[in-house]
Amino acid sequence: MRQALPTDGQGLIARKVGSGSIGPVDLSIGHGACLCVAGRSGAGKSTLLRILADLVPHTGEVWLDGQAQSDMAAPLWRRSVTYVAPDSAWWAPRVRDHFQGDATHFSDRMRLPRDLLDAAPDRLSTGERQRLALIRALLGKPAVLLLDEPSAALDSDAVLRVENLLGEFLSEGGILVLVSHDDAQIQRMATDTLVLERVPA
Ligand SMILES: Nc1ncnc2c1ncn2[C@@H]1O[C@H](COP(=O)(O)OP(=O)(O)OP(=O)(O)O)[C@@H](O)[C@H]1O
């Protein structure tokens, strides 16, 4: 497991967050740390990430470096606390139209063909779309990345390339919350783990 940095009020902190299907959940993640979220299908992993990104109504409170989520406009909060869905949305004609800045460095690191940046999003494979969604999020320079099964569709070499980039994000003080069903990936990436249990109806 990776080493966590101490939080001392900094980092991402959630207290008693929940919605109809999950919670209440407490968590605290320091800069440079990766919380892996596991649990059975339907346990609420995606819902927890969407709560942390302020994408769904919820109870409880979330803070980033002492700044409360409830005191910020949701779009501004999401620039710092960015959710990457397993089924990312693409709306512009070309892939590169979705990026803030030059994606070639990240795309080369992932060994993606350069012509993909000029491609129409609907011709991307599932794994290409997953990696390009991660690149799009990284180019936004978030403080926190909330990744929902980011390498579920990837071969083992591509998984390690993704983890390498995420390791770099962590070493620069980024905060990562990673939903994964892959125990080996959790072993490689986690400084801490949270196993969610489905709330009985
Ligand atoms: N928009 C929604 N409205 C109502 N219920 C929802 C909504 N989104 C998710 N749920 C329910 O909340 C529960 C948790 O769903 P969630 O997608 O968070 O689980 P998960 O742990 O991520 O599952 P998986 O591993 O299958 O992706 C499920 O019972 C799901 O049906």
Image (cartoon, rainbow, N blue to C red):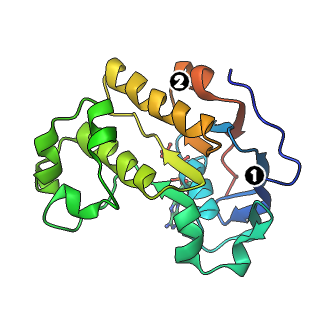
The local crowd at label 1, few if under 14, some if 14 to 19, many if 20 or more residues have their Cα within 10 Å, is many
Look at the image and tell me in which quarter the N terminus lies: top right
Residue 106 x/y as whole percent: 34, 40
26, 117: nearer the viewer: 117
Determine which residue is flagged by label 2: 185
Horizontal arrangement in the rendering, residue 47 relative to residue 70 (left or right): left
88, 104: nearer the viewer: 104
Instruction: Say if 74 sits above or below 32 in the image.
Output: below
Instruction: Say if 24 sits above or below 3 in the image.
Output: below
Observer able to see residue 180:
no
Sequence order check: which comes first, mark 2 or mark 1? 1
Residue drawn at x 27%, y 62% is 98
Residue 97 x/y as whole percent: 22, 63
For marks 2 and 1, give the CA distance: 23 Å
Residue 154 x/y as whole percent: 32, 29
Q: How many labels does the image show?
A: 2
Give the amino acid type for the residue marked by disc 1 in the picture.
Answer: Gly
Determine which residue is flagged by label 1: 11
SS for callout 2: helix
Horizontal arrangement in the rendering, residue 177 relative to residue 16 (left or right): left
The local crowd at label 2, few if under 14, some if 14 to 19, many if 20 or more residues have their Cα within 10 Å, is some
Look at the image and tell me in which quarter the C terminus lies: bottom right
